Image (cartoon, helix red, strand yellow):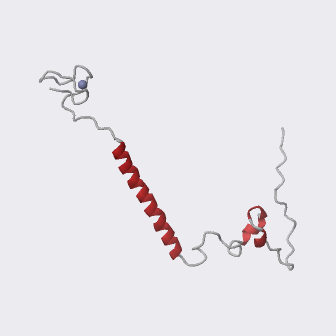
């Protein structure tokens, strides 16, 4: 009786392989080969691609302005405080009626308190 793991010829009544110590009754071990990897990775790639296009399609079904990726400044006026991330044409000065205090872009760090 040949060992399913190492192909060593053992006695017919042997329960454990003499060479590798594996149980003779167990089915042979399975190792993924290149074909299995290609198939599995292909399935994952197809699923990810289908998920991407499904989400893109569903996002396009949303009403404006939620269907666009770049949100206009009118929708998020609070972002005007941070000119760091805005483009020049999106920046508009605050209305004259309500003069805003000169906000520093970076708050002053808290003074360290030593005992
Ligand atoms: Zn063996």
Question: Is 50 located above or below residue 6 in the figure?
Answer: below
Question: Is 94 located above or below residue 34 in the figure?
Answer: below
Name the residue located 22 percent from the left edge and 30 percent from the top edge.
Answer: 4
Residue 27 x, y percent position in the rendering: 22, 35
Question: Is 44 located above or below residue 75 in the figure?
Answer: above
Name the residue located 19 percent from the left edge and 28 percent from the top edge.
Answer: 24
Residue 25 x, y percent position in the rendering: 18, 31
Name the residue located 51 percent from the left edge and 68 percent from the top edge.
Answer: 56
Residue occupying the far top of the picture = 18
Quadrant containing the C terminus is top right
- 87 and 95: which one is in front? 87
Name the residue located 45 percent from the left edge and 61 percent from the top edge.
Answer: 49
Residue 98 x, y percent position in the rendering: 85, 77
Instruction: Name which quarter of the figure residue 105 lies in.
Output: bottom right
Quadrant containing the N terminus is top left
* In the displayed structure image, the side of residue 42 where residue 6 appears, left or right: left
Residue 84 x, y percent position in the rendering: 77, 61
Q: Quadrant of ligand 1?
A: top left
- 73 and 81: which one is in front? 73
Question: Is 109 located above or below residue 87 in the figure?
Answer: above
């Amino acid at each position: 009786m040949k060992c399913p793991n190492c192909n060593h010829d053992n006695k017919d009544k042997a329960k454990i392989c003499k060479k590798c110590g594996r149980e003779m009754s167990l089915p042979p071990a399975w190792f993924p080969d290149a074909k299995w990897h290609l198939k599995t990775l292909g399935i994952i790639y197809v699923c990810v691609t289908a998920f991407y296009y499904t989400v893109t399609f569903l996002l396009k079904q949303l009403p404006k302005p939620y269907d666009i990726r770049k949100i206009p400044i009118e929708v998020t006026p609070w972002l005007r405080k941070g000119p760091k991330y805005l483009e020049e044409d999106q920046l508009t000065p605050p209305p004259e009626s309500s003069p805003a205090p000169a906000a520093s872009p970076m708050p002053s760090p808290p003074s360290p308190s030593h005992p």
